[in-house]
Image (tube, rainbow, N blue to C red):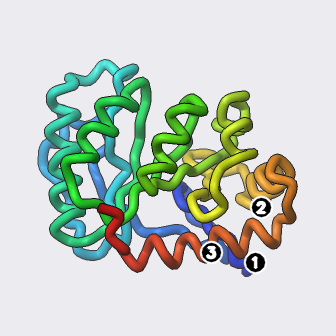
């Protein structure tokens, strides 16, 4: 079933759906996986970032996050971020690097945080869990079309088209228009245009 949907962040790739190949050390694994993977064959570095709700040393998380950003800068690759209760430190650290595309996956931050991310040229991605957040649903209604993605994350049972339907409904558009827009966003992201 090739309908040309982009699933920007998934742990379960499906036929007919485009998902970027990623490699990275998740913040939850920052203490036990200090060595970075080989990024040569991945399209996007990640997921990476900071999770201040996790019982993982914050200094270790930051070291690994910075190592990912250094690699992304050197290789001119975009990054997909895992950000939990750490928006401010993540934004500060991002400002120290030249970026080639930044995607906040599973965004559940505030409207003010979303606006700051958009102002910096960063993408936000929305999935099943984020659609249960009233804040995320509000963000979807005003998000710039050229800075959004949809995702299934770690749920193997959800169809990406269902996410598109809900996001399109919140935005007052059609699934087809949203599909075309995210496909265009994906092409731009993977061209690695510098945002800094």
Q: Position of residue 92 (x, y in %)?
A: 27, 37
Lower sequence index among marks 3 and 1: 1
Q: Residues within 10 Å of mark 3 (few under 14, many from 20)?
A: some
Q: Quadrant of residue 73?
A: bottom left
Horizontal placement of 57 versus 145: left or right? left
Horizontal placement of 25 versus 169: left or right? left
Q: Secondary structure at mark 3?
A: helix
Q: Give the residue pinned by disc 3.
A: 183
Q: Give the residue pinned by disc 2.
A: 161
Rounded to the nearest angstrom, the CA distance separating label 3 from label 1 is 11 Å
**Callout in the foreground (2, 3):** 3
Q: Nearer the viewer, residue 166 or 87?
A: 87
Q: Residue at x 85, y 61 (%)?
A: 173
Residue 162, compared with residue 72, is above or below; it is above
Q: Position of residue 104 (x, y in %)?
A: 47, 47
The label shown at residue 3 is 1
Residue at the front extreme of this rendering: 119
Q: Residue at x 30, y 68 (%)?
A: 77
Q: Secondary structure at mark 1?
A: loop
Q: Residues within 10 Å of mark 2 (few under 14, many from 20)?
A: some
Q: Residue at x 17, y 54 (%)?
A: 36
Rounded to the nearest angstrom, the CA distance separating label 1 from label 2 is 9 Å
Residue 88, compared with residue 149, is above or below; it is above
* Mark 1 in CB contact with mark 2 (< 8 angstroms): yes
């Amino acid at each position: 079933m090739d309908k040309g949907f982009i699933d920007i962040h998934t742990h379960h790739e499906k036929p007919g759906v485009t998902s970027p190949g990623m490699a990275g050390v998740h913040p939850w694994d920052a203490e036990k996986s200090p060595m970075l993977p080989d990024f040569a064959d991945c399209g996007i570095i990640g997921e990476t970032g900071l999770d201040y709700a996790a019982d993982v040393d914050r200094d270790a998380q930051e070291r690994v996050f910075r190592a990912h950003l250094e690699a992304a800068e050197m290789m001119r690759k975009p990054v997909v971020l895992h950000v939990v209760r750490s928006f401010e430190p993540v934004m500060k650290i991002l400002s120290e690097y030249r970026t080639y595309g930044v995607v906040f996956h599973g965004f559940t931050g505030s409207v003010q945080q979303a606006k700051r991310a958009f102002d910096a040229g960063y993408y936000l991605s929305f999935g099943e869990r984020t659609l249960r957040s009233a804040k995320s649903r509000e963000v979807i209604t005003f998000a710039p079309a050229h800075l959004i993605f949809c995702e299934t994350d770690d749920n193997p049972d959800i169809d990406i088209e269902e996410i598109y339907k809900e996001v399109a409904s919140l935005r007052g558009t059609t699934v087809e228009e949203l599909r075309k827009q995210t496909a265009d966003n994906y092409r731009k992201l993977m061209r690695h245009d510098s945002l800094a």
